[in-house]
Image (tube, helix red, strand yellow):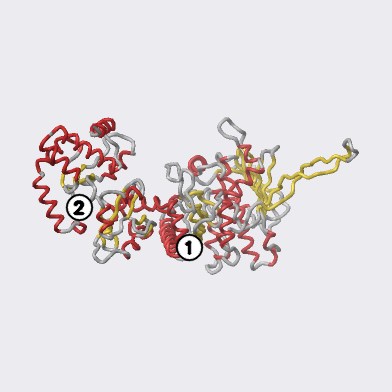
Amino acid sequence: MEKKEFKTESKRILDMMINSVYTHREIFLREIISNASDALDKLAYRALTDDSVGLSGDDFRIKITLDKDARTVTVSDNGIGMTAEELENNLGVIAQSGSFRFKNGLDSDKVPDVDIIGQFGVGFYSAFMVSSKVSVVTKAFGSDQAFCWESDGSDGYTVSESTRSGFGTDVIMHLKDDSEEENYSEFLDFYRIRELIKKYSDYIRFPIVMDVPKSRAVESDETDEDGKKKTTYESYTEEETVNSRIPIWKRSREEVPDEDCVKFYKEKYYEHEDPVALIRADVQGLVSYKALLFIPASAPFGYYSRDFEKGLSLYSNGVMIIDKCADLLPDHFRFVKGIVDSDDLSLNISRELLQHDRQLKVIASSLEKRIKRELKNLLENDREKYEKFFTAFGLQLKYGVVNDYGAHKELLSDLLLFRSMNKKAPVTLAEYVAAMPEDQKHIYYACGESAEKIEALPQSERIRDKGFDLLCLTDDVDQFVMEMLGKFEEKDFKSADADDDELVGSDEKEKAEEAEKTSADLLAFVKETLGDSVSAVRISRKLKSHPVCLSSEGGITIEMEKYFATLPGDNKPKADRVLELNAGHEAFAALSAAFENDRDTAAKYARILYSQALLIAGLPLENPTEYSDLVCGLMK
């Protein structure tokens, strides 16, 4: 029997394909099963017009046989089979695709009736990742002669006459011997093979059958002490279909109600809670796809860590291509789980490598809009569910506003919730604006550890007394969110720390300006006492009944400083702190009196007031012991 050379630079291409193209060796089974499915599709298509085929429906099948003694994995089908010439054309030329040629030859109006998976040319050769030799025994439909193609994957192949009882193809993979690095014997284990079928080929539309190992009770001739016959167990095998065949996402709502989709979600993702939202999509357009997406009710462990992997399961014609395709989800919606199935993906020499990302970008853009629409619908029609969702993933939406220099802020701004000081509940920005009095010009907010502490801030008093609402921001990222948003519905965001003439009457403004002038020497003394701890000391226009507060000037706010302090590394940015004093408070009067009569006492008062401002702002004291001694020194 003459050995034939591959018609391309086979060794170089095979080495590249086996060692570089495929990330996981287990992929070989998916490829071989997909090829078998293609062969069945071709014959099923022919059966539509040729009664001599004699097969229909479940008559078509794929059989997988494991032989541990011979170390072989055999994938058999009763599909179209191949002639000797087709063996040469399809297996003798690497990267040639009989399936691709077949589909191109179909009438355009009949193509949708046929699912051709193996359009990618070299999937068959993935078998050599695990095999020392591959034999293909095949008989074409309508032919009396079978042929055997055989190769060790190195430099060539042989084609010889063979025997096969019926039409179809057997791909017999002789597994390599185990080594310290690789355990090829795992592919002789029924449970491992079934796991791979469930993972990659569960939704092939033809039945995949295997001999399933089982056990059953049988009576023994032996008896126990009571004279009863003992029960023993014997092992046997029974042929069963091991794939689900029809994906749940490809079936209509009439066939699969939402309740079944929720059950599928819980089983697939090991969730105990129902999702807060379910998205079913069947899109026909520039790129057609079906999707079944779920918005979880709670964040999984480690969700906000670097180890979390986002992504949707990507399928092509029911065959899983990528378990977690990150390109299908933007980071701000990374919490979404689900499946996308598209027949339009352009795949390269491997189903793992996408030839172009254009199709993925089109699908991802469409999914982003669908997810946004579903969240908006949930917000407007089931507020309780949405607030539960936002508790789990609101932080992700806020990160989405800040990321990419605010590129997504318009998309996400109307999904945000912040706690309202007036309503004692979360509100949207639109709800806040709708409730604003006519004379209110800004959207007010303040940052802190909790809503209770924010409401107690000295800076909040004037806003509350004016009858305006205040958004209480408690997440580290909130200050950056406000800076990035800038405004909402033409209303500027205004921090409670910022000066605002809207909150101060003209008389109070004049008094503050006058106090600033008459207390210039005192303010300079306090600044000199505190040194570089503050960048300025001034009379406050925002304080009403409280003696002191801390604000900032420049691009870094106090809340930003607190956030940067939690990050690793040195040289962390700090705010230019401004100590603000209430000229109408008795504490300022005591400070002024001490400044005139006892500068040492005045210096102590200045340090006490600064320490109090630090505590109110949620910043650590620079010297807690000194502060304690200063306060106790007053208790004489």
In this rendered view, identify the residue nearer to me: 130 or 490: 490
Q: Which residue is mark 1?
A: 288
Q: Which residue is mark 2?
A: 499
Residue drawn at (21%, 42%) of the image:
577
Task: Locate residue 56, reporting x and y percent.
Answer: 68, 63
Q: Is residue 408 visible?
A: no
Task: Locate residue 330, reporting x and y percent.
Answer: 40, 53
Furthest toward the right, the residue is 227
* Number of residue marks: 2
For marks 1 and 2, the one nearer the N-term is 1
Query: In the figure, is residue 327 to the left or right of 625?
Result: right
In this rendered view, identify the residue nearer to me: 94 or 460: 460
Determine which of the numbered discs, if any, sits on residue 520 in the image: none
Query: Which element type, helix, strand or loop, lies under badge 2?
Result: loop
Residue drawn at (34%, 58%) of the image:
422
Task: Locate residue 73, reporting x and y percent.
Answer: 65, 43
Q: Is residue 56 visible?
A: yes
